Amino acid sequence: MDMCKGQRIFRMGDEVAAVYRVLEGDVCLTRFSPEGAEIVLHRAREGDFFAEASLFGSRYHCDAICTRSGRCLQLPAAALRHCLANDPNFAMEWIATLSRNLRRQRAAQERLGLKSLRMRIIHYLVDHGKDGRVELNQPIIRWATELGASHEALYRTLAEMEQEGILQRQGQTLILLQRQPGSPV
């Protein structure tokens, strides 16, 4: 299905009809506090599933809002439950996918618990990179939000890390350089 920025895919309380996979674009799963503040539960990007937590429920527990236009695959909940119950190979692949997603979410929580932005950047590069090399698939401004920082602070910290020889930037590619043993990061 095509998604337009700002489009609500479902609302909290709607009857569960499907689980979704983002093919391109972004979807934000949100709730609102009693004071009306938006609480972001999850940002689903290309390749991510969303609404899988509602698969065995009757109602969605949050709103899903498209934050970057694109497309998503809609998997009818009844058909997905049927496949899980009747196809062991499919069920094992689904479990493996959910396990990868859970590991990624835990790493993101761990990263946000780090006190310094520099340490969050290093954690991200080690966690997402191959040999410390990451090709960002999002603008710096969105990455800053993911790291719990302003984009100004992120740009400043990246520049400092480059000047110190800790990091090299080549467009959207970030490379964590090897440090000498005992040198501070």
Image (cartoon, rainbow, N blue to C red):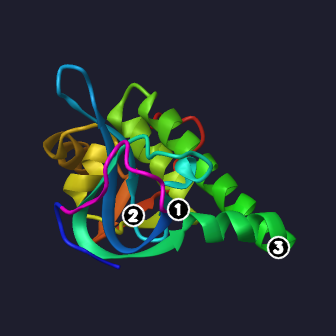
Instruction: Give the left or right position of residue 64, taking residue 19 as reference.
Output: left
Proximity of marks 1 and 3: CB atoms separated by less than 8 Å: no
Given residues 73 and 171, the one toward you in this image is 73
Instruction: Give the left or right position of residue 184, taking residue 83 as reference.
Output: left
- Residue at image mark 3: 87
Given residues 137 and 100, the one toward you in this image is 100
Can you give x and y, in whole percent of width and height, for residue 32 in the image?
A: 26, 32
| Residue 83 visible in the shown view | yes
**How far is disc 3 from disc 2 in space, using C-alphas?**
27 Å
Can you give x and y, in whole percent of width and height, for residue 121 in the image?
A: 39, 45
The reply to whether the magenta stretch includes residue 83 is no
User: Which numbered disc flags the more N-terminal residue, 2 or 1?
Assistant: 2
Task: Determine which of the numbered discs, if any, sits on residue 45 in the image.
Answer: 2
Looking at the picture, which amino acid does disc 3 mark?
Answer: Asp
Secondary structure under badge 2?
loop
Residue at image position (39%, 64%) is: 45
Q: Is the magenta stretch mostly helix, strand or loop?
A: loop
Task: Determine which of the numbered discs, if any, sits on residue 129 in the image.
Answer: 1
**Which contiguous range is marked in magenta?**
7-17
Looking at the picture, which amino acid does disc 1 mark?
Answer: Gly
